[in-house]
Amino acid sequence: MKDNFDITAMDMEELEGAKAVLKKRFPEMIEGYLEDAEMYFKNIKEGLDGGDLEKIAKSAHPLKSASAGLGVSGVSNIARAMEETAKTGDANAIDTIRPLVAPLKEALDYATPKLRALLDDAV
């Protein structure tokens, strides 16, 4: 699997739409997403260290979905690739997923300050 992911991909219109709909609950949703994303990332790394494809898939799936729902496409796309690879059960799946950890971290690191800036605007 090649690292051809755009870690900066974010749909700001999707985020602004969520902000308009959720109003006062938007900050809570963003804070929850950021906390959960950190936990899922940690679990993915633990799954890799332990060779646990099920743990990787179970962590990548909600990270993929939550990120897609917010328009954080860079994170969502990488998490989707991790989940799909983990679900194959292929003997080389761990080796295929491992190089995706750095781009996933970069995508999360890119998105986090942008999401926090939206929180500042919401206050």
Image (cartoon, helix red, strand yellow):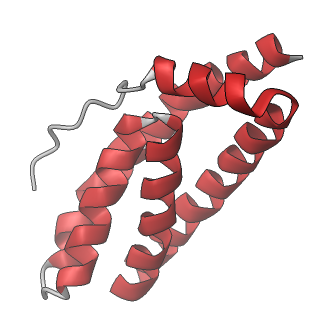
Q: Is residue 73 left or right of residue 58?
A: left
Task: Give the image quarter of residue 53.
Answer: bottom left
Residue 122 rendering spot, x and y as whole percentages: 82, 17
Identify which residue is drawn at 13% across, 88% down: 91
Work out which residue is located at the far front of the displayed protein and give it: 21
Q: Residue furthest top?
A: 121
User: Which residue corresponds to the image point at 81% horizontal and 33% vertical from the top-left?
Assistant: 27
Point out the image quarter for the C terminus: top right
Q: Is residue 11 above or below residue 105?
A: above
User: Considering the image in quadrants, where does the N terminus appear?
Assistant: bottom left
Kindly identify the residue that appears in the image at 34 percent across and 31 percent down.
7
Coordinates of residue 25 in the picture (x, y in percent): 83, 37
Instruction: Locate residue 94 relative to residue 75 in the image: left or right.
Output: left
Is 23 above or below relative to 31? above
| Number of numbered discs visible in the structure rendering | 0
Is there any visible trace of residue 52 in the rendered image? no
Give the percent coordinates (x, y) of residue 106: 43, 36
Asked where in the image residue 52 lies, by quadrant, the reply is bottom left
Classify 97 as above or below 33.
Answer: below
Image location of residue 56, percent across then percent down: 41, 75
**Taking the image as drawn, is residue 90 in sight?**
yes
Judge by depth and name the residue closer to the eye, 83 or 51: 83
Q: Nearer the viewer, residue 77 or 24?
A: 24
Q: Residue at x 25, y 65 (%)?
A: 97
